[in-house]
């Protein structure tokens, strides 16, 4: 997927994976973000909210990528 839209990475984010929903909808905000703080790695899906954390960087990256490849969820729209 190629897009010219860039989204700002939150502080501490070290990697970002596009979800399946992001690819289908061409929405670059639907990502799984990997963060690192004090040697603890974590990922959070910006679509469904799934999270995981641990001390092994490669395990968290693998989990984030596997989740992103399957996640079709979209965040609930905000109400006005």
Image (cartoon, rainbow, N blue to C red):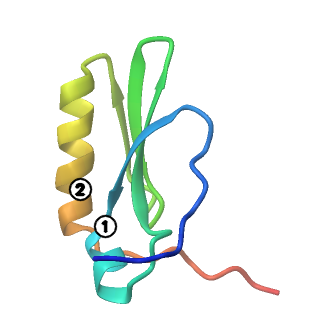
Rendered image quadrant of residue 21? bottom left
Tell me: 11 left or right of 73: right
- Percent position (x, y) of residue 11? 62, 36
Task: Point out the residue furthest to the front here.
Answer: 4
Q: Residue at x 70, y 79 (%)?
A: 78
Tag 1's secondary structure? loop
Q: Is residue 7 above or below residue 13?
A: below
Tag 2's secondary structure? helix
Q: What residue would you read off at disc 2?
A: 67
Q: Residue at x 22, y 50 (%)?
A: 65
Taking depth in this image into account, of 18 and 49 the one nearest to the observer is 18
- Percent position (x, y) of residue 53? 36, 30
Taking depth in this image into account, of 73 and 10 the one nearest to the observer is 10
Q: What residue would you read off at disc 1?
A: 19
- Percent position (x, y) of residue 7? 57, 62
Rendered image quadrant of residue 58? top left
Q: Are marks 2 and 1 in contact (CB under 8 Å)?
A: yes
Quadrant, the C terminus: bottom right
Tell me: 23 left or right of 70: right
Taking depth in this image into account, of 49 and 2 the one nearest to the observer is 2
Q: Is residue 57 above or below residue 18?
A: above
- Percent position (x, y) of residue 48? 42, 65
Alpha-carbon distance for marks 2 and 1? 8 Å
């Amino acid at each position: 997927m190629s897009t010219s839209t860039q989204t700002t990475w939150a502080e501490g984010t070290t990697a970002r994976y596009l979800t399946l929903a992001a690819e289908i909808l061409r929405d670059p905000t639907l990502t799984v973000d990997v963060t690192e703080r004090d040697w603890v790695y974590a990922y959070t899906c910006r679509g469904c909210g799934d999270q995981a954390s641990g001390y092994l960087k490669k395990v968290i990256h693998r989990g984030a990528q596997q989740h992103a490849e399957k996640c079709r969820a979209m965040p609930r729209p905000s109400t006005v």
